[in-house]
Structures are given as structure tokens and as C-alpha cells.
């Protein structure tokens, strides 16, 4: 299992950063390799990715979500096995730290080599930087979902 952790400080209030992160269909605007995300219902999404010519489709489920605190997910179908959590930390009235942790199972020689060489770390770091640029340039979120999803017991 491979793992990446990254954090980025964004110059927007915690509500704005969190609300934008709940807008999964906007992820292709700042995440490299993500072609499309379709929100199926409040807790289910369908992803289409293409990273270095490796195209994948999979479904994911939001397993825990608390406004202005965290969004956690896990894949439920498809080849890509992964899980992650994003947490939001208020630094002051207009600054938020977004912390990202993603765990996944690389498949095949190319993905395993990429993980070993840190390509995945660089991708997540670049995505975090693009999220910062995206939300700061807008100054406001493109939408919001303020629902609460309790972690399964």
C-alpha cells in the first residue's frame, strides 16, 4: 500500500475551502489526471482518470463527512483501490490549512515504480497547489454540500 500526505494553506475562510472540496465535479479543474467525476448521490461518485496514459474508472463512497472538519472516502468498485481523507484547519478568519492523505494500492510495474520514485507525491503536491490557486483566484466556492455523514461503526 502506498501513501501520500500533503498540506496546503489557502487564503480563504475555512467554510469556503471546505465547501469547494465538496464540489467533486469541479476536481478536474485543479486535479491532474482526473478527466471527470460524476456525483451519483450525496455519498457516491464515479471517477474517470487518465494518468500517464493509464485510464481508470471507479466508484467511490464518502464514508465520513463533517462540515468544515473532514471528508473521507474509499473506492467501492473498479481497478483503483484507494481511500483518503481531507481535513480542514482554521488558521485565522481568512486562512485555512487543507491536509490531504491518500492511501492506494499501485498495480503493475509502472505504477509501483512511479510510487517508489515519488511521482504520486509530486502529483498530489501539484494538485494541492492548483487547488490553492483555484480557490484563491475565485475567492468563493462554486457550490456547497453541508451534509453530515457519520463514520460507519
Image (cartoon, rainbow, N blue to C red):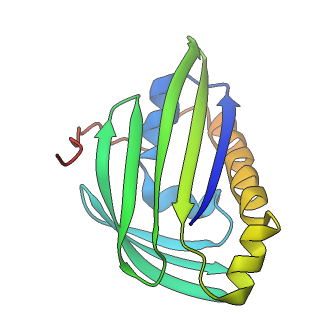
The correct choice, above or below, for 105 with respect to 85 in the image is below
Q: Is residue 2 visible?
A: yes
Q: Is residue 142 visible?
A: no
The mark total stands at 0
Residue 36 left/right relative to 55: left
Residue 28 left/right relative to 124: left
Query: Residue drawn 83% across and 68% down?
Result: 117
Residue pushed farthest left? 153
Where's residue 39, x and y in %?
33, 64
Query: Residue drawn 61% across and 57% down?
Result: 3
Where's residue 24, x and y in %?
44, 57
Q: Quadrant of residue 129?
A: top right
Q: Quadrant of residue 61?
A: bottom left
Relative to the observer, which residue lies in front, 107 or 137?
107
Where's residue 37, x and y in %?
45, 69
The correct choice, above or below, for 101 with respect to 87 in the image is below
Query: Residue drawn 49% across and 78% down?
Result: 80
Residue pushed farthest top? 92
Residue pushed farthest right? 117
Relative to the observer, which residue lies in front, 11 or 54?
54
Residue pushed farthest front? 1
The correct choice, above or below, for 14 with respect to 126 in the image is above
The correct choice, above or below, for 6 with respect to 46 in the image is above
Q: Quadrant of the N terminus?
A: bottom right
Where's residue 5, x and y in %?
64, 46
Residue 134 left/right relative to 119: left
Query: Residue drawn 59% across and 24% down?
Result: 96
Amino acid at each position: 500500500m502506498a501513501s501520500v500526505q500533503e498540506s496546503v494553506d489557502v487564503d480563504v475562510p475555512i467554510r469556503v475551502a471546505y465547501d469547494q472540496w465538496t464540489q467533486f465535479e469541479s476536481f478536474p479543474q485543479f486535479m491532474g489526471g482526473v478527466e471527470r467525476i460524476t456525483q451519483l448521490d450525496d455519498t457516491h461518485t464515479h471517477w474517470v482518470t487518465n494518468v500517464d496514459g493509464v485510464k481508470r474508472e471507479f466508484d467511490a463512497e464518502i464514508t465520513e463527512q463533517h462540515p468544515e472538519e473532514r471528508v473521507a472516502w474509499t473506492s467501492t468498485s473498479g481497478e483503483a483501490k484507494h481511500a483518503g481523507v481531507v481535513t480542514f484547519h482554521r488558521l485565522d478568519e481568512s486562512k485555512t490549512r487543507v491536509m490531504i492523505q491518500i492511501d492506494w494500492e499501485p498495480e503493475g510495474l509502472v505504477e509501483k515504480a512511479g510510487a517508489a520514485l515519488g511521482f504520486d507525491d509530486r502529483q498530489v503536491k501539484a494538485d494541492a497547489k492548483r487547488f490553492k490557486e483555484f480557490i484563491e483566484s475565485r475567492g468563493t466556492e462554486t457550490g456547497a454540500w453541508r451534509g453530515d455523514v457519520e463514520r460507519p461503526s
